[in-house]
Image (cartoon, rainbow, N blue to C red):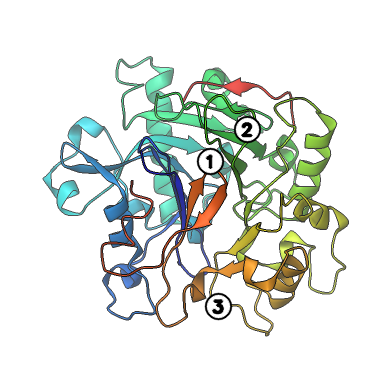
Amino acid sequence: MANPTIKYYPVGNGDMSLITLEDGTRILVDCKLTAKSDESTDPKICDVKKDLLNSLQKRSGNYFVDVFILTHGDRDHCHGFKDNFYQGDPAKYGQEDREENRIIMDTMWFSPMIAEQYTNDDEDAHQCEAERRLDLHRNNHPDKDKPGNRIKIIGYDSNKEYKDLNHLRAVPGDVVTRFNDKNQETFSIFIHAPFKIHLDSPDKDKNSASIVFQARFKAYSWKSDFCCLAMFGGDSDHTTWAQILERTKRFKNDVNQQALSWDLFLAPHHCSWSFFNDTSEDDVQATSLEALDYARNREAKVIASSKKIVNNDDNPPYADAKKEYIKKLSSEDKFLNTAVEPNESAPEAIVFDITANGPARAPKKTTGSAWASAGGAGAAGTIITQG
């Protein structure tokens, strides 16, 4: 079997990452698929749709991902969802869907926060598809657990609209080991957020209520330690990370023991200042710096999924935020910006092979197909096996 991989796509100020496990299971985290990136011949614009399709499997001639995780509903995290992902009864997937290469999501991870704040058509389409799947469970439909209908609720909902579906729910502190109806012995996800406190807040904010999780890889099933820990945080801000630190340290058990550690850290909100404080004039929050102190070794890397970071007033990305990350790394080259890797004139996805010795940067692109195949191959600490 091939090594697991993590691929971080160059999508400007946005997020789109593909986790591929050694058995071929694929987990897509967020998406930003635009006509410009799909159709341009400009080498400065990566054809992420083409590469994603090249990295996916087909079933009955149709592209699919095992799990799609939307961290939150901002457009730069779900752009293109409506047009590129299939919504509806998978048994009705038709010729037009096939011609448009619409991707079937065998399982969706759904945050109730999305249900409470609609801001764009792609988010609305995601919500409608989630509700379709949830209704199958409410009605005990015989197809509710089939690929293309599966769903997992992540976090709480302030209005308790989904309280009758708690059997589908995973909350902060839970560890998920089952993906697309298949148990994984060398991969799991520790869920850090969203917290109920953010959902109940009168100043409810999508970013602070992003799904935050740690992807955990083992070299062998019998190992107790992890060969790679990768942190994904959507647009989570410093208030979220303060809660993550407090709650994870409060519950000191075997599940939480390494929950703050990381080898790869996807900078929240596209390397904006919000991870460190509210405005650029504010001092850096000690809790944000502490979160970065959990880097496991000198090879730890921060990835900024953003446009090129330059010294101006843009936020995101923000040059002073980049400086704070670099201070916590062993060298400046451990900070990677998707817009300029391997170079600004022809950016490619940043790909890591997950080896027994940790994440290793995959070889750079040499032909049109060689690179695309890379990656194609704080609570009680409950272990979750459903999903």
Tell me the residue that label 3 is attached to.
Answer: 308
Quarter the N terminus occupies: top left
Between residues 33 and 343, which one lies in front from this camera angle? 343
Q: Is residue 162 visible?
A: no
Q: Circle 1 — which element?
A: helix
Q: Residue at x 55, y 51 (%)?
A: 359
Residues tagged 3 and 2 counted as in contact (Cβ below 8 A): no
Residues tagged 1 and 2 counted as in contact (Cβ below 8 A): yes
Cα–Cα span, label 1 and label 2? 9 Å
Residue 127 is situated, as x and y percent measured from the top left of the image, at 45, 42
Q: Residue at x 63, y 83 (%)?
A: 310
Q: Is residue 290 left or right of residue 225?
A: right
Tell me the residue that label 1 is attached to.
Answer: 115
Task: For marks 3 and 2, give the one nearer the viewer.
Answer: 3
Amino acid type shown at disc 1: Ala
Q: Residues within 10 Å of mark 2 (few under 14, many from 20)?
A: many
Q: Circle 3 — which element?
A: loop
Count of marks overlaid on the render = 3
Residues tagged 1 and 3 counted as in contact (Cβ below 8 A): no
Task: For marks 1 and 3, give the one nearer the viewer.
Answer: 3
Amino acid type shown at disc 2: Asp
Looking at marks 1 and 3 on the same chain, the residue that comes earlier in the sequence is marked by 1
Q: Circle 2 — which element?
A: loop
Amino acid type shown at disc 3: Lys
Mark number, residue 157 = 2
Q: Quadrant of residue 23?
A: top left
Q: Residue at x 77, y 63 (%)?
A: 328
